[in-house]
Image (cartoon, grey):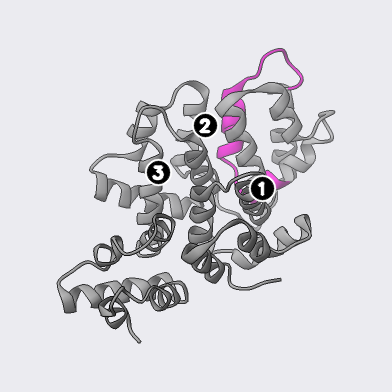
Amino acid sequence: MNIEKAIKTKGMDEVTIVNILTNRSNEQRQDIAFTYQRRTKKELASALKSAFSSHLETVIWGLLKTPAQYEASELKASMKWLGTNEDSLIEIICSRTNQELQEINRVYKEIYKTDLEKDIISDTSDDFLKLMVALWKGRRAEDGSVIDYELIDQDARHLYDAGVKRRGTDVSKWVSIMTEPSVCRLQKVLERYKSYSPYDMLESIKEEVKGDLENAFLNRVQCIQNKPLYFADRLYDSMKGKGTRDKVLIRIMISRSEVNMLKIRSEFKKKYSKSLYYYIQQDTKGDSQKALLYLCGGDD
């Protein structure tokens, strides 16, 4: 059965629709949506909008966008009303590659007729703003084959000198070192840092800065050290304790399903003993659960 028939079925055949959309690549979903609109003169997202529960609607809506459209809309939503949902902003900006950020920026401007940087500046402040804007510009060096150990040692020493060694933190220096070198170089800088400081970098951040800035630096360092583990931790945090932080869970499952989901699943099982699939089964329900389990891809 195809999407068109499933929509025309009395009461709408949700199982078939979820099955089709979650078992296709994003490129295939774009083709399905394009074909549906050409044949029916209606947008697929609009045709499905009123038929699903709110959580399932959120999943399907996200799946029908391109990755850059989805993340641009998540960033816009994080800054929409008074106050900013810094958590979403931090996660997306700290974890995406230069190329991904450039594409999100292009799409954001196309959809919302403004630069995301302007929206960040109007919605955040102080040192946190400096870090977000520096990361958002996507000017990090790309990983290269030449490793300059002198530069690595220099960066590690500067991180220590600008933070733990002195009274008060030179945040500008930290921002510069955390946002300009390649990920490969930064991984080695963080290792080398331990030879200068009595704390590792995560502990140093907790000692030196607070609030959104602390959260952003922690997210950045965790992404540098091990990105799949970073997302495994965020998924676990979204489901632990009472209630599920559905927005975080849904966003990560949609955005990572075709990027590094197998690695995330592996890190999750290694750290939390049970599989990501098991946790989703325990913490979600209904049709949205089926969709998330399909995106997870299997039990480990």
Q: What residue did someone put label 1 on? A: 240
Residue 75 got which mark? 3
Mark 3 surroundings within 10 Å by alpha-carbon count, few (fewer than 14), some (14 through 19), many (20 or more): many
Going by the numbered disc 2, the residue's amino acid type is: Leu
The magenta stretch is: 164-187
Residue visible at 64% across and 60% down?
282
- Percent of width and height locating residue 243: 59, 46
For mark 3, give the secondary structure. Answer: helix
Contact (Cβ within 8 Å) of mark 3 with mark 2: no
Question: Farthest residue toward the left?
Answer: 41
> Is residue 97 rendered magenta in the image?
no
> Is residue 169 rendered magenta in the image?
yes
For mark 1, give the secondary structure. Answer: loop
- Which of the pair 224/51 is nearer the observer? 51
Q: Quadrant of residue 164?
A: top right
Dot 2 or dot 1: first in sequence order is 2
Q: What residue did someone put label 2 on? A: 131
